[in-house]
Amino acid sequence: MILSKYCKIFPYRKNLDSFILFSTKKASSVLISKSVLDDIEKDNLSPEEKETLIKLGFLIQDAETEKQEMLNFIDDLNAINKKFKVIVVLNLDCNLACKYCFEGKRKGKFYMSRETADLFIDFVKNNVLSKKEEIKITFYGGEPLLSTDLIIYISERLKDLTNVSPTSHLYTLLHPSQEGNKLTFCASLITNGTLLTPDVVGRLKPLGLKIASVTLDGPREVHDQFRPFKSGRGTFDMIVRNIKDVCDMINIHIGGNYTKDNYSEFPSLLDYLMDNGLKPDRISSLNFYPVIKESPEFALPDFTGGCVSINEPWLFDAGIFLRGEILKRGYGTQKIIPSPCMIELRDSLVVNYDGAFYKCPGLIGREEFRVGDIKTGIMDYRQSHNLDNYKNDECLNCSYLPLCFGGCRYMKFIRDGNLNGIDCKRPYLDATLERLIYQDIELTRSKQSVP
């Protein structure tokens, strides 16, 4: 047995005679003594130690077999996946005037019609129901709650389709391969939170709504500068009030978008939430992300900030700092896990308001990245989206591969104007992975130990 190529070894700061092993392909960590590390290198482990380290992904039989496993990783993932995940863009309209708006110049009074919604439901019925065990739909915009009636319409029909009795003749016709397993449906929202009232949630929850992701861009003075109503009035107080009113009805995920100039102010938002009753037991998770720059085609003329690469040095410290502040207060946040790009996941799809299909929300409205529509179905996008871009010797020999898989296609396009090649995360992971692991050990105490 030998050490996996996708194993990182870090010295343990609290004991110079110990080391942390972290498997990037299993997202597992283990604290071992120097003597155990020596035994690994000499293949002199006890059967119990060997079994544990194999299970956690640290020991393998041979490098060539592991390389082949990584070559097939996403194909195997697609083969066993039983979920259909779809982001439905209900409109490109909004009641806010965000300074850095992600949709930018794409925004306008563009709404999905009832006819398009019916065609989408037909697409699901004809292409998904017989193959999957779960449908997970994310309603997106613009502001999706400007289309609340359409959310209800789509959810009712999808819920009806998935709730057909497993013993009925219709279920057998729709699900010939399911062998009586009931198909499930759940929904989530990505919303600015201003319309997320108890009345709205009360209408949507019986139709499968489980999660709402709401954006708070820092404390009130920062948030209101970046995310005001179109009138210029601040939105912070209304959003926080709505979160407090609905967080016991559904799961609330709070996200926030920071810049190089304001990220240091975000911890005061966390303190405000804690002081106002929105403690970790009422918020499902909390994550902060850097604002990403848009291409000139869609970027708003008055905003020039935003990053174009995760490897920008200021992000190393900003990301670590903010994640640490979140964990210190006991909130759940993003974990270090293998993370293939949505583009590589066969059963993940974006449906635009006009019925066009895309493989990433950042690519909507770019005709060269349209991959079909609800009438004609999905076309081959292997070349246009540079699938399997990580299947090269440099990536396969990189210990970070499972945490990257070629990086973010959208960021690659924003930076370089194309999807050729990879968006390598090595500089970022070199600078942050050890620190991220220490955060988990010291702030969540999530480590395992081999004696």
Image (tube, grey):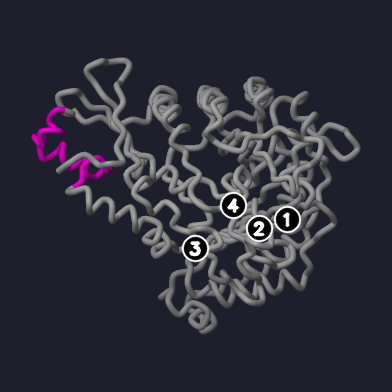
Q: Which residue, given by chain and number where applicable, does mark 1 sit on?
A: 203
Q: Which residue is drawn at 44% across and 37% down?
A: 336
Q: Which mark is residue 90?
A: none
> Given contact means CB atoms under 8 Å apart, are the residues at marks 2 and 1 in contact?
yes
Q: In which quarter of the image is the N terminus?
A: top left
Q: Give the range drawn in magenta.
A: 38-60
Q: Can residue 134 be seen in this view?
A: no
Which residue is identified by label 4? 418
The numbered dot on residue 346 is: 3
Q: Is tag 4's residue or tag 3's residue first in the polypeptide sequence?
A: 3
Q: In this view, does 47 lie to the left or right of 375?
A: left
Q: Where is residue 378 in the image (x, y as percent from the top left)?
A: 58, 71
- Identify the residue under disc 2: 206
Name the one closer to the observer, 418 or 128. Answer: 418
Q: In which quarter of the image is residue 276?
A: top right
Dot 3: what SS? Answer: loop
Tell which circle, 4 or 2, labels the residue nearer the N-terminal end. 2
Vertical relation: 60 (above or below) 226: below
Pick whichever of labels 2 and 3 is earlier in the sequence: 2
Q: Earlier in the sequence, mark 4 or mark 1?
A: 1
The three-letter amino acid code for the residue at tag 4 is Asn
Q: Could you tell me which residue is drawn at 59 percent across and 44 percent down?
A: 411
Q: Can residue 139 be seen in this view?
A: yes
Task: Please say whether residue 370 is one of the residues in the magenta stretch.
Answer: no
Q: Residue at x 25, y 29 (%)?
A: 449
CA gap, disc 4 and disc 2 = 43 Å
